[in-house]
Amino acid sequence: MVRNLFLLHLLLIILTLPVLYLGRFSSCLPFLYVLVLFLMGLLRNRTMGIPPLTVLAAGYLSQLPGIIPGFFILTEDLWPFGLEVFEFIAQIWQTPLYPLYPLLPHAIYHDIPLYFLVTVTASFIIPLIPAAGAWLSYLVKKMYQPDP
């Protein structure tokens, strides 16, 4: 499951670059990504019986290339060195979200643009999507399972 989620994210990184040339249509790609993640969690629980917590753990493991730099960036005051490399890695890892950035308001919080906050925190939020699909499948199974 970790490998599939990781490879899906890498595929979306590669697909995002040519899709950006489609203009406003490119903003559909991140929503398609969210749908695929949700369905992946839903189907893994339904067909293979993978529990929602396992899907969540797999999601967090697959997002480690974004979580580790995000952790360093969010705790920047604790480190005695520059974090430019971590900022670069976080931005590259969240390339699938780039088509959404023009839709975000041009807000700044504590001298940090909103798009950058979305970039840094996305790796912490993305694993919740397949876990939500698995949880929904688990609830439906539990609801329709006959009582003994």
Image (cartoon, rainbow, N blue to C red):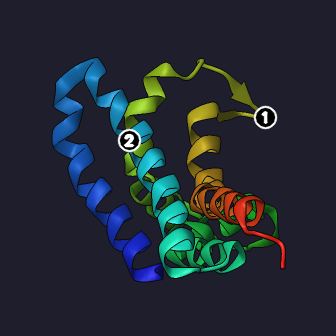
User: Is residue 38 at all visible to an observer of this figure?
Assistant: yes
Q: Name the residue carrying label 1.
A: 110
* Residue 86 relative to residue 73: left or right: left
Where residue 31 sits: x, y (%)? 44, 37
Q: Position of residue 19 (x, y in %)?
A: 20, 37
Is 4 or 142 nearer to us in this picture? 142
Q: Quadrant of the C terminus?
A: bottom right
Q: Nearer the viewer, residue 99 or 37?
A: 37
Query: Disc 1 marks which amino acid?
Result: His
The amino acid type found where label 2 is placed reads Leu
Where residue 125 sits, quadrant-wise, is: bottom right
Q: Quadrant of residue 97?
A: top left
Q: In terms of depth relative to the viewer, which is nearer, 99 or 83? A: 99
Is residue 63 in view? no
Residue displayed at 23% across by 56% down:
14
| Horizontal relation, residue 16 to residue 80: left or right | left
Which mark identifies residue 32?
2
Residue at position x 50%, y 75% from top? Answer: 62
Q: Please tell me whether residue 147 is drawn above or below residue 97 in the rendered image.
A: below
Going from the N terminus, do you reach mark 2 or mark 1 first? 2
- Residue at horizontal 30%, vertical 19%? 24
- The kind of secondary structure element at disc 1 is loop
Q: Is 117 rendered above or below residue 114?
A: below
Label 2 to label 1: alpha-carbon separation: 32 Å
Q: Residues within 10 Å of mark 1 (few under 14, many from 20)?
A: few
Look at discs 2 and 1 and give the one toward the viewer.
2
Q: Is residue 84 above or below residue 62?
A: above
